[in-house]
Amino acid sequence: MNKIATSTFFALLSATVAFSACSKEEKKSPEVPATKAQKAVPPQTASEAPNVAPQATKNFAAGMMKSYEKCRALLAADSSEGIVDCAKGIVEASKSAHASAPDAAHEHIGTLVKAAEALAATPMDDIEQVRVAFGDVSKSVVAMLTAAPEAGKEYHVFECPMAKGYKRWAQPGAALENPYMGGKMLSCGSEVHDHHKGMMHEEGKAASANPAHGDHDH
């Protein structure tokens, strides 16, 4: 009887130890995947999201403005050679930028495409007609920069009362270079700040007081 009792005691002891070990494993197992899931997913998603939209909004106009500036510089130098290429560049960049542009700029990008297509189709042997067509492009550009002021923050907008058709244009430099007048009145005009909508910087204030403005018979 003692041997039987002893065997029974050890059998019960072994079963108890085994049951206790299994219970501990069962308690640990649900915690492992939950801990990994909590550490792995949320931090990356949350930290990356805010950096995407502002960058896209700020840079959506870069391609359009690069081609637009080429056209403006050519006309300021009294040349229409290369206007077709830069006008087509505006069209291509405008179509590509539509998806990343803010809603407020969409309408103006649409009109910009049409104006740039018309500029490309203008007879290049009549530079005055080319300048009028460029004015229609500038009208859409200035409207776009006004609707999305963050994109136009680094551009200066000037106005020339002597220009035929639309009288404003945008350029990155503060030194006025008039695409409508060219060499005969290159510095004719004055800076306007509508497109900045409260974000006008100090260099813009200085540029608006161009001493050359008073040298013309407007």
Image (cartoon, rainbow, N blue to C red):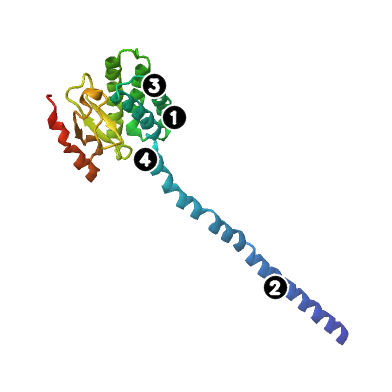
Q: Of label 2 and label 3, which has the lower sequence position?
A: 2
Instruction: Find residue 65 and report its horizontal and vertical position in percent.
Output: 36, 31
Residue at which label 2 appears: 20
Q: Which label is found at residue 82?
A: 3
Residue at which label 1 appears: 96
CB under 8 Å between discs 3 and 4: no
Q: Amino acid at mark 3?
A: Gly
Q: Residues within 10 Å of mark 1 (few under 14, many from 20)?
A: some
Instruction: Give the quarter of the image for residue 109.
Output: top left
Picture residue at 44% right of the left edge, 29% below the top:
96
How far is disc 3 from disc 4 in space, using C-alphas? 28 Å
Please say whether residue 99 is visible from this viewpoint: yes
Q: Nearer the viewer, mark 3 or mark 4?
A: 3
Q: Nearer the viewer, residue 85 or 214?
A: 214
How far is disc 1 from disc 4 in space, using C-alphas? 15 Å
How far is disc 2 from disc 3 in space, using C-alphas? 85 Å
Please, which residue is most extreme toward the bottom here? 2
Q: Which label is found at residue 58?
A: 4
Q: Amino acid at mark 1?
A: Ser
